[in-house]
C-alpha cells in the first residue's frame, strides 16, 4: 500500500475508527495529527476523512468501498502489532514527540513555570521544571515519569 499523501501536499494526517483508540493515542504521542472519537459513526468518520484530507485507519474492510479517500486496513488486533503493521504500510510523517494534546489532538505549547503553579498539584510543581498547555482544552502536561515511561516504550517498540 505504501505512502499515500493526498494531493502530494505534505504531512499525512490520520483519522482512526473507533476500534483503534490506542493506536490513535500512540499517534498523538508521536506528534501526528490524528482525529479520533468514540463513538464515531461511519458516515461522520468518512465525511471528516474527506473534508480534512485525512488517511483513514480502520479495522473495518467494508469502509473501503464507501470512500475514495486513502484507507489503510489494520488487520492486527493487538496494539503493538497494529503499530508494526502501520509502519509497514505508511511512511510515518515527521513530527515532534509530545507536541500534541493526547485528549484533543491540538498542538501544545510551553507554559511558563510561574503560570503553571496554580494549575498543577504542588508536588508536581515542585518536582518538574517544564510545563505545557493545550491551546484548546487547556490540559496541562509536564515532563514527568509518564513521559519517560512512554519514551521508553516507544524505543522498545522501535
Ligand atoms: Zn487538548
Image (cartoon, grey):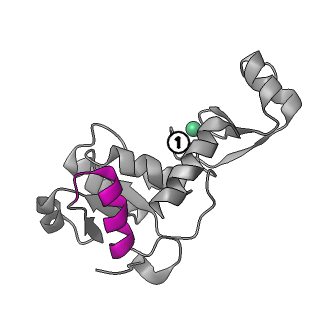
152 vs 144, nearest the viewer? 152
For residue 93, side relative to residue 45 (left or right)? right
Going 30% across and 49% down the picture, which residue do you hit? 20
Instruction: List the residue tagged with mark 1.
Output: 102
Label 1, ligand 1: CB separation under 8 Å? yes
In this rendering, the answer to whether 69 lies above or below 100 is below
Residue 12 point in image, percent of width and height: 47, 69
Question: Residue 79: within the magenta?
Answer: yes
Quadrant of residue 22 within the rendered picture:
top left
In this rendering, the answer to whether 151 lies above or below 84 is above
Going 82% across and 36% down the picture, which residue do you hit? 129
Going 62% across and 43% down the picture, which residue do you hit? 147
Badge 1: how crowded within 10 Å, few (<14), some, or many (20+)?
Answer: many
Residue 39 point in image, percent of width and height: 27, 37
Majority secondary structure in the magenta region: helix
Residue 26 point in image, percent of width and height: 46, 51
61 vs 154, nearest the viewer? 154
Quadrant of residue 71 within the rendered picture:
bottom left
For residue 26, side relative to residue 128 (left or right)? left
Q: Look at the image and tell me whether residue 32 can be seen.
A: no
For residue 114, side relative to residue 130 (left or right)? right
65 vs 84, nearest the viewer? 84
Residue 25 point in image, percent of width and height: 44, 46
For residue 6, side relative to residue 129 (left or right)? left
- Report the quarter where the N terminus lies: bottom left
Q: What range is drawn magenta here?
A: 76-89
Question: How many numbered discs sit on the rendered protein?
Answer: 1
Q: Quadrant of ligand 1?
A: top right
27 vs 33, nearest the viewer? 27
Q: Secondary structure at mark 1?
A: loop
Amino acid at each position: 500500500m505504501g505512502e499515500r499523501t493526498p494531493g502530494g501536499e505534505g504531512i499525512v494526517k490520520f483519522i482512526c475508527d473507533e476500534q483503534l483508540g490506542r493506536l490513535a493515542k500512540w499517534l498523538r504521542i508521536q506528534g501526528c495529527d490524528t482525529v479520533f472519537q468514540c463513538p464515531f459513526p461511519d458516515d461522520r468518520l468518512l465525511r471528516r476523512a474527506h473534508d480534512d484530507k485525512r488517511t483513514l485507519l480502520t479495522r473495518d474492510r467494508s469502509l473501503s468501498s464507501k470512500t475514495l479517500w486513502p484507507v489503510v486496513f489494520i488487520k492486527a488486533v493487538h496494539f503493538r502489532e497494529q503499530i508494526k503493521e502501520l509502519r509497514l504500510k505508511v511512511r510515518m510523517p515527521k513530527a515532534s514527540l509530545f507536541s500534541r494534546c493526547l485528549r484533543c489532538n491540538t498542538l501544545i505549547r510551553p507554559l511558563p513555570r510561574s503560570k503553571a503553579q496554580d494549575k498543577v498539584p504542588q508536588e508536581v510543581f515542585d518536582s518538574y521544571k517544564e510545563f505545557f498547555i493545550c491551546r484548546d482544552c487547556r490540559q496541562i502536561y509536564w515532563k514527568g515519569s509518564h513521559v519517560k515511561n512512554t519514551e521508553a516504550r516507544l524505543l522498545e517498540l522501535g
